Structure formats: structure tokens, C-alpha cells
Amino acid sequence: MARSSAPPGSGIFLEDAKALATFVQRTSAESARQAREAFLEDHVSTVYSLLTDDHAKFLRLDDLIAAVYKLIEGLLPSDIELELEAKLPLAEQKGLAIDVMLFLSYVLNHKASGEHLCQAMRLPRADSIERLADFAKSGQLTLAAASLERIDKASFLTLNHPETLNAEDERSLEDVEIAVDLALLDPHTEVVVLRGAPIDKYGGHRAFCSGINLTRLQDGKISPLWYLQRELGVLHKIYRGLAQPKIVSEASEETQEKPWIAQLDKFAIGGGCQYLLVMDSIVAGTDAFLSLPARKEGIIPGAANLRLPRFVGERLARQMVLADRRIACDSDEGRMLCDRIVAPEKVESSVQALIDELMNSGVVSFAANRRAFRLVQEPLDMFRRYMALYAHEQAFCHFSPALSDNLRRHWRGASGH
């Protein structure tokens, strides 16, 4: 199909939307992308306002994308095209979903729209609310890839993908977010512990998390949207708490948040390490390590580039992200991230001791202190702008030939991935 110049914008939303719809039908994918970006430069605020009834509705990412198709023809590749491409291995995909990520990047880069979207993604899921009464009564939740168990006033959220060393993929993301919601909503839970399930390979001992499931990634089963769903949903809820369905300033927002403890057994690789950066306390075994092999994988490690330097400094953060430096928890560098490092057989008892300490001292002021740290270290506007860049850059990393080549040479069939 011949490549054409993007239609000049008139500045009038309806006229430009009509011109865009006509243009993308007769041009190349590259020119269509350029035209979509030009349209969003002028009209992203109007688009988001129309999608959300002037910010009256809170739409999660999937619902927001679905609403785009009903509002503006041609602003995204068709849902049929995207579905067909998603069935292919990653190396055979052309990257149509880049346009979806670019749309979200423009939304996030616009202050009012981006903050509203961040808030929408921190609301409890509808299917979480449906389960709340049962969990509040039983203290038990078992899903395919995660479980939640309340013991006294602490809930234990277990990443339960033992066949992949508790790796994360599109199947686990939903289950973990539901568990996070319930732990935060449950009126009987005061502290939450995040841990990994026992692994047969390690004699039935626990291991924390081996990061993204690279085999599923290579097979094309993990879309670039997954990264944003994880960062804006699961991790942001842990870090900033559940939101309320009303627009208020960050300083006066009424969040539902609780202390989080990570039980770090064996390793925290990639996404597992990213979880540590939103924890309030980390108890690790002396045999455990953490790493962020982003360079070898060919992607950006979530919000680690934003958060990791606060803990270990700029230089070590660059070494971990760009040079695949592995950190032993039982080291000077490891103690910058981990609060307590104990013998492997004492990790669980040390976690329980920490829970008891929190219960004895009370957790009322804990959330207030979390908010105070956040407001200084990572205000919402900083996070929003980072996510706008992340959406843009991660989209191109995801579909780069280098990523597919890395997966083909190093990861196919690797144990745990």
C-alpha cells in the first residue's frame, strides 16, 4: 500500500477524526501510526474526556481500549487485526499493538487524563469485590496462580506457579491482582505478606519469583499491554493503596493501604525484584539473591529505573539494569534492599516475628508514614510521567528483533521460564 503524508490537522476534533478515519484506510501502517500520533498530539484530552464522560467514568485499560473502537474509527488498528496477530509467535508479529501502547502513552502524558487513568487502575476489580464477603468470612482464597490465606491479622499472598519457578504471565496477573485487592479490602487483615510457593526442584522449599515467563513471551502470549496492566494495577495498588471512585488531590486522597512484607526465599529475578521495590519490609535468606536481567531480556524492568536508585544509588542501579549484576542478599549491597537477612530455615519465623512487632506497635500510623514518604519520593505526577515514557519505550522494546533473538538464543525451554 502506498505511503501517504498525514492529513494536516485543523484543530477541530470532529473534522480531524473524520480525516484520520479516511486516511488510515488507504495508507501504510507506518504512515497510519504517524497520523494517529499527530491526531493525539492535538486531541488526546478531548478523546479521553469523551471516553470517560468528562472523567465521570473510571475505565480500566481493557475497557478504555474497547471504548476507543466505538468512539473514533481508525485511531487504533482494528480489534480483529490485533487478535489475529496475537495468535502468532512474538518473532512473527509486526507490532500492531504498538499503536495501542502509543495511545496510552499520550493519555498518561496528559496530566489530568493520565492521573485519572492511574486512579481507575487502582480501584478494586469488580470480581474482587464479588469475592470479598466469602474471603472476609473464610480467610481463604485459592486461584490458579495465586492464593491468599489469613492467619490471625496477617494475610499471606502466595505466588503459585511452581512449575515455572513462580514466574509471571498473562494467566497469573489477574489472579495476583484479585488477591491484592482482597488483602487490602479485608477488614480483618492488618498486614500482608507476599511470598512464593514451594518448588519441587528445591526439595519443597519456597522460592519467591523468577520474573516474566519468557517462554510465554516468546510464544506471543504476553502482549505489551500486560506490562502496563501490571505496573498500573498490581504493583501500584501495593505501593499506593486502593483508590476511591472520586477525584481528589493526592495529599487528601483516602487510600486503603496496609504494610507489606516480602518473604524472599531463594531469588527475586526481574519482576520478582520489582516487587521488592514496593515492599515496606523484606526478610531474606542468606542464600537468596536478586537481579534485574533487563539487558539480556531486552525490555525495561517496569518501574525499577524509577525506584531502584532510591535504595542502592544511581551507579549500582545502572549496573543491575544495564549490566545484569546479581546481588547476594547477604552482602553490603543486599542490605540496601533487604531489612533482615537470616538463615534460610529461619526466614518464616523471622517474618512472623516482624508481623508480631507490627501488631504490638500498631499499624494506624503506618499508612500515614507511607504516604509521607511517597509524597516526597514518588509523587503521582512523577509516576504518571514515567509510565508515559515506559508505555512508549516498552512497546518498541517488546517488538524489537533483538528481544526475539535473545529469547530464541537464550531462553527457549530454560528451566523456570
Image: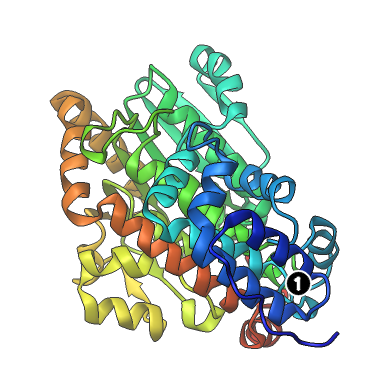
Q: Quadrant of residue 363?
A: top left
Q: How many marks?
A: 1
Residue placed most toward the observer, 323 or 83: 83
Left of 252 or right of it: where is 391?
right
Locate the N terminus and report the quarter of the image it occupies. Answer: bottom right
Q: Is residue 397 in sight in this rendering?
A: yes
Q: Is residue 54 above or below residue 232?
A: above
Q: Is residue 67 above or below residue 396?
A: above
Q: Residue at x 25, y 52 (%)?
A: 379
- Residue at mark 1: 23
Left of 107 or right of it: where is 386?
left
Q: Is residue 20 above or below residue 57?
A: below
Q: Is residue 210 in sight in this rendering?
A: no
Q: Residue at x 67, y 62 (%)?
A: 223
Dot 1 lies on which element?
Answer: helix
Q: Residue at x 52, y 57 (%)?
A: 44
Crowding at mark 1 (Cα within 10 Å: few <14, some 14-19, many 20+): many
Residue placed most toward the observer, 251 or 215: 251
Residue placed most toward the observer, 316 or 240: 240
- Residue 319: percent from left, percent from top: 32, 83
Left of 300 or right of it: where is 101?
right
- Residue 412: percent from left, percent from top: 71, 77
Q: Quadrant of residue 384?
A: bottom left
- Residue 277: percent from left, percent from top: 33, 57
Left of 215 or right of it: where is 340?
left
- Colouring convention used in this rendered image of the protein: rainbow
Locate the C terminus and report the quarter of the image it occupies. Answer: bottom right
- Residue 266: percent from left, percent from top: 44, 60
Residue placed most toward the observer, 202 or 183: 183
| Kind of residue at badge 1 | Phe
Q: Quadrant of residue 152?
A: top left
